[in-house]
Image (cartoon, grey):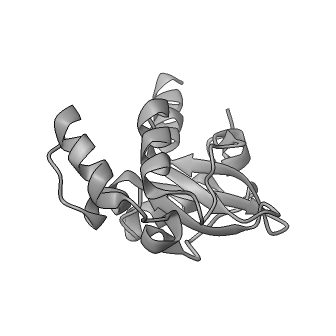
Amino acid sequence: MDRTNSLVKDWMTKQPATVHPETSAVEAYERMRDRNIHRMPVVDAADQLVGIVTRSDIEGAVSFRHTEGGWHEGRFALAGTIVSEVMTRDPLTVTPATSMRETAGLLLSHHLSGLPVVEDGKLVGIITETDVFRLVVKLCEE
């Protein structure tokens, strides 16, 4: 492995789970929970990135206990809330050709855990801190 030229395209998740701005916050949260993911890019009908939503964004919109019973209360409190109301608009992004070094620096300096990957205005993937850790493990094995 070339230690100096690791690129996002080699480590990102291609075709990540996405959500639309008008999707209910409850549906978005449950999709993330069911897939064991913590964030989803928000795209419009043309797959243009318009935001990103995290479990924390949705959890922060209402107060609920993090138990199954608490989630039922949270679902009720979130009724009528859509993703566009809780998402981060115009998130920081990288391209497939961005170096992993630069990407790790962005995640660290902006206190983020993931970044959408965009090429020619379209969402093509997502890169997360877990992907950075996978790279570190690979480098340590060499």
The spot of residue 36 in percent (x, y) is: 43, 33
Residue at the farthest left position: 65
Residue 1 found in image quarter: top right
Label count reads: 0
- Observer able to see residue 7: no
Q: Position of residue 58 (x, y in %)?
A: 36, 59
Q: Quick one: quadrant of the C terminus?
A: top right
Residue in the image at 49% along x and 50% along y: 28
Q: Which residue is at a point 42% across and 50% down the rendered structure image? A: 26
Q: Nearer the viewer, residue 66 or 135?
A: 66
Q: Examine the rendered structure and indicate whether residue 55 appears above or below residue 139.
A: below
Q: Position of residue 109 (x, y in %)?
A: 39, 69
Q: Quarter-wise, where is residue 90 in the image?
A: bottom right
Viewed as shown, does residue 77 lie left or right of 32?
left
Residue 140, compared with residue 55, is above or below; it is: above
Let me know if residue 138 appears in the view. yes
In the foreground, 104 or 4: 104
**Residue lying at the far bottom of the rendered structure:** 90
Drawn side of residue 134 relative to residue 59, left or right: right
The extreme top residue here reads: 141
Percent coordinates x, y for residue 71 in the rendering: 25, 42
**Residue drawn 64% across and 59% down?**
20
